[in-house]
Amino acid sequence: MSHGVRAAIIGATGYGGAELIRLLQAHPLVQITSVISTSNAGAPLAEHFPHLQEIVLDVLDVLDVDLIAGKADVVFLATPAGVSAELSPKLLAAGLKVIDISGDLRLKSSADYEKWYKKPAASEEVLARSIYGLSEVFGDEVKGSDLIANPGCYPTATLLGLVPAVAAGWIDPSTIIIDAKSGVSGSGRGVSLGVHYSEVNENLTAYKVNKHQHIPEIEQALGRIVGKPVITTFTTHLVPMTRGIMATMYASVNGEHTLEDFTQLYSQYYEGRKFVRIRKNGKLPSTKEVFGSNYCDIGFAVDERTGRVTIVSVIDNVVKGAAGQAIQNLNIMQGWDETTGLLFAPVYP
Ligand SMILES: NC(=O)C1=CN([C@@H]2O[C@H](COP(=O)(O)OP(=O)(O)OC[C@H]3O[C@@H](n4cnc5c(N)ncnc54)[C@H](OP(=O)(O)O)[C@@H]3O)[C@@H](O)[C@H]2O)C=CC1
Ligand SMILES: CC(=O)N[C@@H](CCC(=O)OP(=O)(O)O)C(=O)O
């Protein structure tokens, strides 16, 4: 394939892996050459995901760095926390480019990682080398890099919704409160009581309050934008739906800025970036309007009475929050148009 790349996917039997396969098989410049499983190597992928039958390679490979290096140019890791901390140095040493969708390489401080993830951190060298791939904000750093820490699903929705206002100094970072909700696929394909149908259906639950591993990730990125530490309140909720994240964010407005001002500021910040769509005239987005797509839709309400702005940001957690943004980052790394293979409309209704 001319100018294209060969891709391997580790964690192909999980939700993030399956979504990478769905999207990459339609990418004009990528050929999937290996789908990898640690627990079911040798078995057909379609045994796990019948919807992928006859769409992509059907035999799961073992996880072997030399084998991957012989078959692929880039590796996507869609694996639980702890895996890429150990594996990515070996993949890099074998000459592969690495895009990690887990949380292992996002936090620059190993002490923070160990505190929030309760696992040993990656080496300082790997943490220093990894680029935080929030495409629309740090895309310039992604270009030409060989190690991407793909942002978490909640941080993607949250940061895309906050960065323009924080960067412009229009909101006071110390007043930010983030109220976020996710569909159940955000917790992966593994089963547990918390994601059991009868526990989730017709129910709404707040979880990991003040303990969520995405808190330091959001604070690290906002801290980079303002140039000093930022502390936020971030609460996550599980919603009885399959895909989707809504982050509703509140902050005090510095000075006099109207709804129209916010709309214009964000439209300018994301000008030319196809995947962030700004709602006009106070219209607010809903999760179904981005379902199955790589879009992040953002809307605002400004309350003159309280002096606060409400920012609503929605994404599909498995696409823009994981596989889609990972592919967007591959496009940027390779110097391709960032939308290559990703310009499909959301599924509606
Ligand atoms: N689901 C989502 O919306 C999002 C997920 N993420 C992150 O992406 C990663 C993958 O998530 P998701 O796909 O949902 O999780 P899943 O639980 O659905 O899949 C994880 C996969 O990892 C593989 N795996 C498990 N242990 C190992 C190991 N030791 N070495 C290599 N592979 C292993 C498993 O496959 P096998 O046993 O066959 O090897 C499994 O299929 C996680 O870190 C998650 O936090 C990030 C953003 C959004
Ligand atoms: C609904 C649900 O359970 N969501 C998960 C998102 C996990 C995730 O994406 O974790 P990393 O980004 O750290 O890899 C959670 O809240 O922990």
Image (cartoon, rainbow, N blue to C red):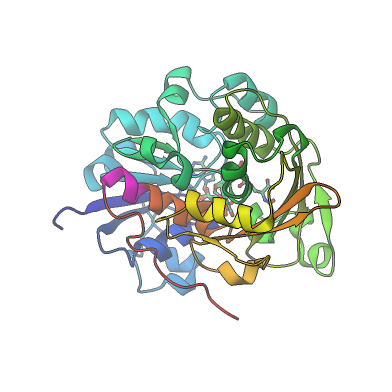
Placement of 227 over or under 170, stated as above or below? above
Placement of 341 over or under 173, stated as above or below? below
Q: Residue at x 47, y 42 (%)?
A: 137
Residue 193 drawn at (x, y percent): 79, 55
Quadrant in which the C terminus appears: bottom right
Observer-nearest of 324 and 290: 290
Single out the residue that lies furthest toward the left.
Answer: 2
Observer-nearest of 317 and 273: 273
Left or right position of 247 against 88: right
Quarter of the rendering containing residue 147: top left
Residue 271 drawn at (x, y percent): 44, 54
Asked whether the viewer can see residue 61, the reply is yes
**Segment tinted magenta in the rendering:** 330-335
Q: Residue at x 86, y 52 (%)?
A: 305
Residue 160 drawn at (x, y percent): 57, 48
Quarter of the rendering containing residue 210: top right
Q: Residue at x 36, y 51 (%)?
A: 61
Left or right position of 212 against 28: right
Left or right position of 73 against 139: left
Residue 333: in magenta span: yes
Residue 233 drawn at (x, y percent): 77, 38
Single out the residue that lies furthest toward the bottom.
Answer: 349
Quarter of the rendering containing residue 223: top right
Residue 198: in magenta span: no
Placement of 149 over or under 259, stated as above or below? above
Observer-nearest of 339 and 54: 339
Placement of 173 over or under 40, stated as above or below? above
Asked whether the viewer can see residue 14, the reply is no
**What secondary structure is the stretch in magenta mostly built from?**
helix
Left or right position of 245 against 192: left
Quadrant in which the N terminus appears: bottom left
Q: Residue at x 40, y 61 (%)?
A: 21
